Image (cartoon, rainbow, N blue to C red):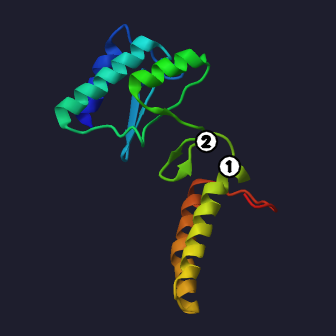
Amino acid sequence: MEILSGLFRKMSADQNFKFHWRCKKDKISHLCFTDDLMIFSKRDVNSIRMIKNVLTEFQDLSGLYRNPNKSSIFLSGLLDAEKEQIIHILGFREGELPMKCLGVPLISSRLKAFYCKGLVDRLTTKVRHWTCRTLSYAGRVQLINSVLFSIQVYWASLFLLPGSNKKC
């Protein structure tokens, strides 16, 4: 990732690269964490081509390929033709907000009940899967205590979980 970061630093030093307006002051072109990479730029086609070139150069150097099925691009304030052109250049699909990282939504506001749908769906799926198996009552209780509680604790460590009388 140091090589990739170096390539992005070199790219962002080029006068033709246009930073995202929120990243311009600090000259942030990308963030790497865990196994995720976030790249920021202005919606400028030349900047998008520069990003594509960096990703291709990194692929050639490292042998690591980007996975278009796991990669998304987030665009705002563009005409449909501009969106299509940028999506075509990078080969990513357009993502939906809020995006998720490590299974939780990345939001800057207070967590609302509808953002918990993924959590509730995950817990419900696990419980349904366990009821189909021949587990004893004590085995189910153990799974609930260890697995379901751990998932809830993980979310609660990141957010104040909202209360809701309705299902998320």
Measuring 19% from the left and 38% from the top, which residue is drawn there? Answer: 63
- Is residue 101 left or right of 112 when viewed as pictured? left
Q: SS at mark 2?
A: loop
Q: Residue furthest top?
A: 15
Reply above or below: 165 against 25.
below
Instruction: Please report contact status of discs 1 and 2: CB closer than 8 Å, yes or no.
Output: yes
> Percent from the top left, x then y, of residue 47?
40, 15
Q: Which mark is residue 148?
A: none
Relative to residue 141, is residue 49 drawn left or right?
Answer: left
Residue 26 lies in quadrant = top left
Left or right of 40: which side holds 129? right
Q: Residues within 10 Å of mark 1 (few under 14, many from 20)?
A: some
Total numbered labels: 2
Quarter of the image for the C terminus: give it.
bottom right
In this picture, residue 12 sits left or right of residue 24:
left
Graded by Cα atoms within 10 Å as few (under 14), some (14 to 19) or many (20 or more), the crowding at tag 2 reads few
Could you say whether the residue bearing mark 1 is in a helix, strand or loop?
Answer: loop
Q: Which residue is mark 1?
A: 111
**Residue 160 appears in the figure:** no
Tag 1: amino acid: Leu
Question: What residue do we see at 30% from left, 28% from top?
Answer: 55
Q: Amino acid at mark 2?
A: Ile
Residue closest to the far right: 165
